[in-house]
Amino acid sequence: RAHTPAQSGKVYFCSRGATGWTNTVIESKNSGGDVTSLAYNPVTGAPSACYRAGTTLRFAYRSGANWIKETADSSAYARYSALAFDAQGNPAIAYCDDADGDGWLDSLWLARKQGSSWTTQMLDGPVVGYGVHAAIAFDPTTQSFVLSHASDPSPRLWSWNGSAWVVDSPPESAEYIFGCGLVISPDGTANLAYSIDSEQRAARRSPGGAWTIELIDAEYVWPFNTGARLT
């Protein structure tokens, strides 16, 4: 697990072995209280993380006993970020930023590494609140990444159709959306988990584009972040 304790300024990687937990510092300053993300490279098996350090979006991975740090975006207020890999082991990060510099998070961005270089692009925004609870997953059926983020009145799902990025949303109409977990099934079904007003919900988009919404919990919940996994 990777985490940033509030006000510590550090990012930790925590792993459990036969004798207990080991905590390793990845970043020693300028990080704290943000949403970080941990994923394992499917080719090398190396644990990897993304996080914000000041106004820099960082990607880090373990090589032997050391952590190697890279700059994915040198100017990004990426308080929310999520990490995924494609089948070849190339990392990609979904994150938020303040595109117009007015002090409000307002956009969803994608950073990708191919070869030795990182590229970035804005997919959504600028609209205040866009990019918050950013999520990303790899679609094995299209060999491309899918991104989502919490937005009112419905989560927004971005996918690559072979020539352009397109956006879609489950048929929700809410005053507030909180959290946004995303996972892609082997058949290409997109699975979202989120909170809408006073309920926890799951939404599935079939490969044909049809949405199905299910109630998870009818009690009032206000999660800071929501995850989704396949079992």
Image (cartoon, rainbow, N blue to C red):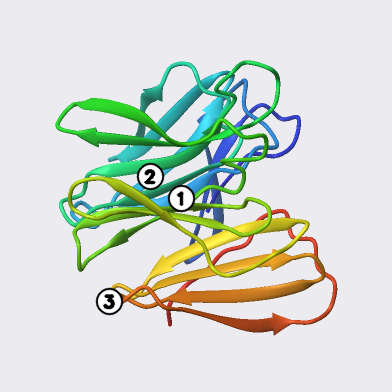
225 over 207 or under it: above or below: above
Q: Nearer the viewer, mark 1 or mark 3?
A: 3
3 and 2 marks in contact (CB < 8 Å): no
Q: Can residue 219 be seen here?
A: yes
Q: Which residue position holds label 1?
A: 38
Q: Residue at x 71, y 73 (%)?
A: 200
Image x and y of residue 2, in percent: 53, 47
1 and 2 marks in contact (CB < 8 Å): yes
The Cα–Cα distance between marks 3 and 2, rounded to whole angstroms, is 23 Å
Mark 1 or mark 3, earlier in chain: 1
Q: Residue at x 47, y 27 (%)?
A: 57
Q: Which residue position holds label 2?
A: 48
Residue sitting nearer the eye, 16 or 54: 54
Image x and y of residue 195, in percent: 70, 66
Q: Which mark is residue 186?
A: 3
Q: Tag 2, which secondary structure?
A: strand
Image x and y of residue 40, in percent: 34, 54
Q: Tag 3, which secondary structure?
A: loop
Residue sitting nearer the eye, 204 or 185: 204
Q: Tag 1, which secondary structure?
A: strand
Q: Quadrant of residue 213?
A: bottom right
Q: Amino acid type of disc 3? A: Pro
Q: Residue at x 54, y 62 (%)?
A: 181
Q: Amino acid type of disc 2? A: Ser
Q: Amino acid type of disc 1? A: Leu
